Image (cartoon, rainbow, N blue to C red):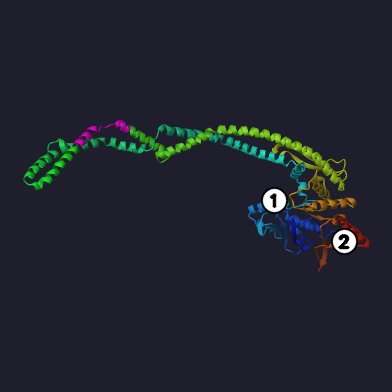
Amino acid sequence: MLTDLTIKNVAIIDSLQISFKQGLTVLTGETGAGKSIIIDAVGLIMGNRASSDLIRSGEEEAIVEALFDISTLPEIKRQLSEAGFDAVDELLVKRSLSRNGKNRIFINGSMATLALLVDIAPRLINIYGQHDSQTLLKPENHLRLLDAFSGCGELRQKFTALFSRLAAVQEQLAGLDHAEREAERRLDLLSYQSEEIATAALKPGEEARLEEQHTLLASAGKLGSGSGEAFDRLYGGDGALLGQLKRISGSITELATIDHALSETAASLEGAYLQLEDAAITLRDYASRIESDPAALQQIDDRLDQIGRLKKKYAPTVEEILAYKAGIDFELEQLHGREQSRHTLEVERDHLTEELKLAGCTLTTARIQAAKKLKHALEGEAHQLAMKGAIIEPTLEALAEPRASGFEKVEFLFSPNPGEIPRPLGRIASGGELSRLMLAIKQVLPDSDVPTLVFDEVDTGIGGATSELVGRKLKNVAARQQVLCITHLPQVAVYADQQLRVEKLISDGRTTTHIRELDQDERTREVARMLAGSTVTDSALKHAAEMLAATT
């Protein structure tokens, strides 16, 4: 609810501070005192267009501040928190207008955007007057009012959930359609790559083994000739090393029979001879096995070239190429499965479409039935509020394409007089009629998530018993929501829980507006003034006191 309003340098208002209470607050005062300026100031807090014309003459800046209690509005607190503002139980909105055009908005002391204010403010306060009936002048709100009256909230929630799921499925299908050509190109590429790697039949560690074999085959001549030559020098040719060593060993062995000190040396020479003999035999056998095989060498060269080409295309090693193939094979599986995915999505889309159609028809039927009842209820209220013969027609128009809210849009058409064709509210209803229509709606649809309602011009063109009825209905609304009302009718003012008098004073040649809360005696005199005019008689005072007593 709105707890405090501060206005500085707005039109004829110099400085004004107002504290509001729960229930019904009425603002009274003579014509031209500045009551409408206060409504304009509230409009600024709601994000209405700002004009430098509102700045008080001789001043450079105008300021409006409003303090709201949002302790029972968790969604507002959540939105403020997400936007980076302090989400406490009080919300302070400040708007400053400057003649140089530097207009600013502050929320809880921090700079804010007009977009954020325009989003939040209508959920805090609504104004119902000539140009401010946001709820009634916007047809998108009419559907919400009809659904609230019909009690089909669950039906609408079900429809919205189905609509959202269907939209998501359709978006997925559209994504598949959009990606189809790219998917085909990708499928061809990956299929070729997978087949190329598979055909190569690579094995981990293969390249190292091939390189080793390549080295051996490429060096076959050198290995054969070298090992054969070594055998000949050791054993096979004239003057071979083993023959010489055999003679030396025999000679030393003979000497060792004379001098045992040479026995160990003789044994070493014998051992060396045997080892060299083994080496010679090994070299002979090795040389006999070495054969030049150009065909095998060419095969290995070809295989290594194939591996080299694959390494250039896919990965630095055979192991990484195989890992790459595993990855593209998985992607190929996914791509091949897209047709199944499409089929699954198409089945779900068709199922959801049928469900949505059934849910939409049920919702439409409920709305048609509710529209008839709402028409009767609203017209009954309107006729009581000095709009005899008025027609209020909640019309349903089928949409070309469904929306999240259903298959139709709803708009309230209005005709103030019998015989006139009902037309959209914004084109035909006056400010007073709009205010009284909203008051009628509040009788039929008492629940609202907007904590503060401002009624301006609600008493325009009415009097007598009707004005008393308006007062009672405002009091009824104020039992659930905070209501602020500008009125010139004493029959309305007497139902107030709080009465504020707006006065225009002239001091030092300047006109200023003041406001003050009236106590019981002051209320009696103010109501008497409203009854009798500028000359308040004892009879008027007595009548005023009786009227106030009758409403307590």
Residue 547 visible in the snapshot = yes
Q: Which secondary structure lies at badge 2?
A: helix
Report which residue position mark 1 lands on.
119
Q: Which secondary structure lies at badge 1?
A: helix
Image location (x, y in percent) of residue 83: 64, 53
Image location (x, y in percent) of residue 397: 76, 38
Give the farthest residue toward the bottom: 508
Cα separation, mark 2 vs mark 1, equals 41 Å
Report which residue position mark 2 lands on.
524
User: How many residues crowd mark 2 within 10 Å: few (<14), some (14–19), many (20+)?
Assistant: many
Badge 2 amino acid = Thr
Give the farthest residue toward the top: 295
Q: Is residue 157 above or below residue 351?
A: below
* Span highlighted in magenta in the image: 280-298
The residue under the point 31% across, 33% down is 297
Badge 1 amino acid = Asp
Q: Quadrant of residue 65?
A: bottom right
The residue under the point 74% across, 60% down is 4
Image location (x, y in percent) of residue 180: 56, 34
Magenta: main secondary structure equals helix
Q: Nearer the viewer, residue 288 or 311?
A: 288
Q: Quadrant of residue 47?
A: bottom right
Residue 56 visible in the snapshot = no
